[in-house]
Image: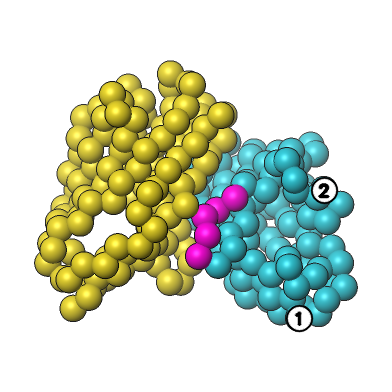
Amino acid sequence: GAVVSQHPSRVICKSGTSVKIECRSLDFQATTMFWYRQFPKKSLMLMATSNEGSKATYEQGVEKDKFLINHASLTLSTLTVTSAHPEDSSFYICSARRTRDRGPYEQYFGPGTRLTVT
Amino acid sequence: AQKVTQAQTEISVVEKEDVTLDCVYETRDTTYYLFWYKQPPSGELVFLIRRNSFDEQNEISGRYSWNFQKSTSSFNFTITASQVVDSAVYFCALSDLNNDMRFGAGTRLTVKP
């Protein structure tokens, strides 16, 4: 159990376009989901925490208008990279926390989405 | 503020050698969780272990073992008799009760045949 999927796994888009990445918890409900970004040969950096039915909480330095996060259901969160630029090219990973978990909490990670902006 | 330091950027060993990956953390919380993840070339994070701050018992799982020492704020990971399939980037991470997880920079392990 506790499987998280991401779609697409890879996407190439042109500069100036927007791209949406989906994160789904397949066999559990997730009140909270997290979005991370990983540059080549670098660590994972938390971008934002997504809570179902409310606005996402963004980490310092992450542009809210650039990276739109929607968590409309207990199994789906989406990250939309708007007006993408080549510097947005990165590996985006989501994770989900199971709603029923009361601690210790565990994040279940998706397989990641590799975004390339040309 | 929470911080995780993995001082070893890259390690290269020959198959069957033992290797230890270091992890040092900083936190002001008394309750926290420590993790190790493996990231193979495919990119997907593979969960290896979680430890809470009140459990300092060392753990062994097959060829993997972990040494948690609060006195030195370290949570080191040892692979015994390394294999080529162990080649990956390994991340140490620290999480508070709110699930605010911070990752170390990662250690790239290469095991040569």
- Using the image, name the chain to which the residue with label 1 belongs: A
Q: Earlier in the sequence, mark 1 or mark 2?
A: 2
Q: What residue is at 64 percent from the left and 51 percent from the top? A: A35
Q: What's the residue type where badge 2 is placed?
A: Lys
- Using the image, name the chain to which the residue with label 2 belongs: A
Residue A5 visible at all? no
Kindly give the residue lying farthest to the top in the view shown.
B30
Magenta span of residues:
A41-45
Question: Which chain is displayed in cyan in the rendered image?
Answer: A
| Residue A88 as seen in the image, left or right of residue B18 | right
Q: Does residue A27 sit above or below A8 in this rendering?
A: above
Q: What residue is at 86 percent from the left and 67 percent from the top? A: A83
Q: CA distance from mark 1 to mark 2?
A: 22 Å
Residue B78 visible at all? yes
Q: Quadrant of the C terminus of chain B?
A: bottom left
Q: Tell whether position B85 is magenta.
A: no
Residue position for label 1: A118
Horizontal and vertical percent position of residue B102: 52, 41
Give the colouring mode of the picture.
by chain
Q: Quadrant of the N terminus of chain B?
A: top right
Question: Which chain is displayed in yellow in the rendered image?
Answer: B
A74 and A68: which is toward the camera: A68
